[in-house]
Amino acid sequence: AVELAKEIGFTNINVDLIFALPNQTLALWKDNLQKAVILSPQHISAYNLIIERGTPLADMVKNNNVSPLSTDEEADLYEFTMEYLEGEGYEHYEVSNYAKPGFKSKHNANYWNRSNYLGFGPSSHSFWSTTPSGTNRRWWNVRSIKKYCEDISAGRLPIAGEEILNLEQSIDEFVMLGLRSSGVDLLQLKNALGVNLLNDTDGTIKQLIDHNLAVVDKQVLRLTQKGFLLCDEISKSFLSRQEAP
């Protein structure tokens, strides 16, 4: 598929990969990555398998027909992924995304920056913000294709649900999305949402830096490779203490 896309004339190609599959070894995963790199796509997304409730795989795990990898094994595969792809010239710019210079995903960055976007079609999501600290609305369309078409034909918006994010939720998203990607702009967080992490009174940021989990560069807090391994835990350490001013 990649070779055909190149022949047709596409010059910006992404390959999606999943690691931490049941019974997957480092050797098998390395072989996957090597084959992907040989194809020389401009972008590679490498996702850690998540066993979702209600899926056939979740049932197989529940019934002991499949054994998921241990946390340590998953961490080993993730560390190898980061080191290998960066060694092959891919920049690790988000927890699961790697790009050659000039090919970071603008589409994904739009979500991580909490910029406005509109989704069209069944199950699609939309987000619209007047200002960072103003009204932040998220809504999603019905899942049924039939219901979607009926609503459109009748002149109705096919919206299944919506939420208005309060200030605390907006702060949480700003921090979480920043830590997962290019970093948390501490000055922007202070000016837009009133949260001053620059005044690190409890030493959280200092501890992260001391343990090589994060760096602060030009007032942007970024996770290191080691920090990405603990991204969820680090995010929670900030979110649990945030309160709207």
Image (cartoon, rainbow, N blue to C red):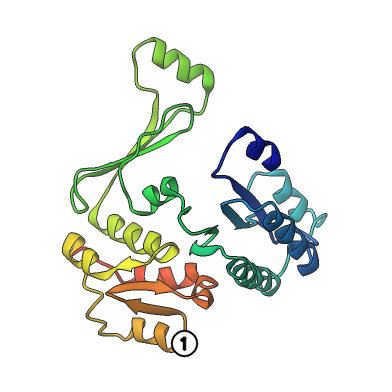
x, y (%) of residue 13? Answer: 58, 45
Q: Amino acid at mark 1?
A: His
Q: Picture coordinates of residue 40 (x, y %)?
A: 64, 53
- Horizontal side of 139 relative to 188 (left or right) equals right
* Residue sitting at x 25%, y 66%: 243
Farthest residue toward the right? 65
Quarter placement of the N terminus: top right
Name the quadrant of the C terminus: bottom left
Closest to the observer, 172 or 217: 217
Q: Nearer the viewer, residue 87 or 21?
A: 87
Residue drawn 65% across the image and 56% down it: 49
Query: Does residue 136 appear in the picture of this structure?
Result: yes
Q: Position of residue 227 (x, y in %)?
A: 49, 75
**Residue closer to the observer: 161 or 32:** 32
Report the side of 155 relative to 85 (left or right): left
Residue occupied by mark 1? 211
In this rendering, the answer to whether 43 lies above or below 28 is above
**Quarter location, residue 82:** bottom right
Is 229 displayed left or right of 132 in the figure?
right
**Residue lying at 42% horizontally and 89% vertically, measured from the top left:** 210
Residue at 57% across, 38% down: 10
x, y percent for residue 101: 48, 59
- What element does badge 1 sit on? loop
Q: Is residue 52 visible?
A: no
The correct choice, above or below, for 220 with respect to 106 in the image is below
